[in-house]
């Protein structure tokens, strides 16, 4: 009887070790918004996935997601963690219970804004000057820094971007929007902060050829901008994740610096504690952007 009991306890102990190891070794799926294409996302974020894998002691699989597939992937439970733009992050928080762990701190900081540009000398200086003009932005209802922020900014002045412009169209690339304004093809465009500075550095434009509509300044923020500042991308975790695992991930994120190998590969400075999404939600609700389009 003692022999049988010994064999049973030994077998149970071995199974416990196996099950514990299996639980620790479970692959974690990290979804990343591949706004500049999946290959670019793999190049930029693979080292980040390796970094998290090392910190957690668990394999982390990078899952690059085309912009239009991010919400779908979350709905289908294809990812455990998600790095996505602020609008997408609010959607997955409200609809699927994802919890923001940290905010991206990229080379421009942990906040960004929207910019409205016009060609110098065409008479557009203030928001009210845009009425009856031809304007372009990035994807309606989805682009944060190149549609949402500016649309809300103008709405607060009583201007409806879909009603008060002579024409309002979507562009495919922010570079193209800037060049269209430069050429006089359109009167104004919505772009995100840093775009003008980057293009001038590349020799494509001269910032002095443009007017920043409703230009504002915020202490410590060095880039030209029109709107108030909003939080950068969020790193979020799916609900019901083991709190210990979530805590380890957050600690790993906040430990990153600009010198961390993963930061260098992604071109970021690391992460900071998650910023509030209240200002962003207010803008989304006012513009009836999903998930607030049925309210």
Image (cartoon, rainbow, N blue to C red):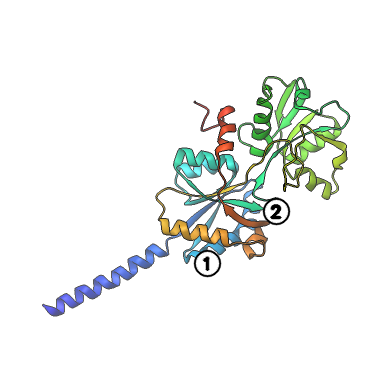
Which residue is disc 1 drawn over? Answer: 54
Instruction: Assess disc 1: are there few (<14), some (14-19) or many (≥20) residues with their C-alpha within 10 Å of its C-alpha.
Output: few
The answer to whether mark 1 and mark 2 are in CB contact below 8 A is: no
Query: Residue drawn 42% across and 48% down?
Result: 239
Q: Does residue 114 lie above or below 222 as drawn?
A: above
Left or right: where does residue 255 sit relative to residue 190?
A: left
Instruction: Assess disc 2: are there few (<14), some (14-19) or many (≥20) residues with their C-alpha within 10 Å of its C-alpha.
Output: few
* Residue 212: quarter of image: top right
Rendering coords of residue 1 (x, y %): 10, 77
Rendering coords of residue 15 (x, y %): 29, 69
Q: Does residue 66 lie above or below 14 as drawn?
A: above
**Front residue (pair 46, 144):** 144
Q: Does residue 117 lie above or below 132 as drawn?
A: below
Circle nearer the viewer, 1 or 2: 2
Q: Secondary structure at mark 1?
A: helix
> Residue extending furthest left?
1
Q: Secondary structure at mark 2?
A: loop
Which residue is disc 2 drawn over? Answer: 107
Left or right: where does residue 272 sit relative to residue 75?
A: right
- In the rendering, which numbered label is found on residue 291? none
Rendering coords of residue 172 (x, y %): 70, 37
């Amino acid at each position: 009887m003692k022999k049988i009991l010994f064999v049973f306890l030994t077998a149970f102990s071995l199974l416990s070790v196996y099950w514990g190891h299996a639980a620790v070794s479970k692959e974690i799926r990290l979804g990343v918004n591949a706004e500049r294409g999946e290959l670019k996302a793999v190049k930029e974020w693979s080292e980040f996935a390796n970094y998290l894998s090392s910190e957690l002691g668990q394999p982390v699989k990078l899952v690059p997601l085309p912009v239009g597939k991010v919400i779908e992937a979350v709905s289908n439970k294809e990812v455990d963690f998600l790095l996505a733009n602020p609008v997408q992050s609010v959607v997955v928080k409200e609809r699927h219970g994802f919890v923001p762990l940290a905010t991206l701190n990229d080379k421009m900081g942990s906040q960004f804004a929207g910019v409205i540009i016009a060609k110098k000398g065409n008479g557009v200086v203030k928001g009210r000057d845009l009425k009856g003009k031809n304007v372009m932005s990035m994807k309606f209802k989805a682009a944060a820094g190149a549609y949402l922020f500016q649309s809300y900014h103008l709405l607060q002045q009583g201007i409806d971007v879909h009603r008060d412009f002579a024409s309002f169209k979507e562009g495919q690339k922010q570079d193209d929007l800037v060049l269209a304004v430069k050429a006089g093809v359109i009167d104004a465009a919505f772009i995100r902060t840093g775009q003008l500075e980057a293009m001038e550095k590349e020799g494509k434009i001269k910032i002095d050829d443009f007017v920043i509509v409703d230009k504002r300044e915020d202490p410590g923020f060095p880039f030209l901008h029109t709107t108030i500042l909003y939080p950068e991308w969020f790193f979020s975790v799916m609900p019901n994740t083991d709190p210990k695992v979530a805590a380890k991930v957050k600690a790993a994120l906040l430990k990153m610096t600009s010198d961390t190998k993963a930061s260098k590969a992604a071109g970021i400075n690391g992460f900071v504690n998650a910023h509030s999404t209240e200002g962003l939600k207010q803008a989304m609700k006012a513009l009836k952007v999903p998930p607030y389009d049925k309210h």
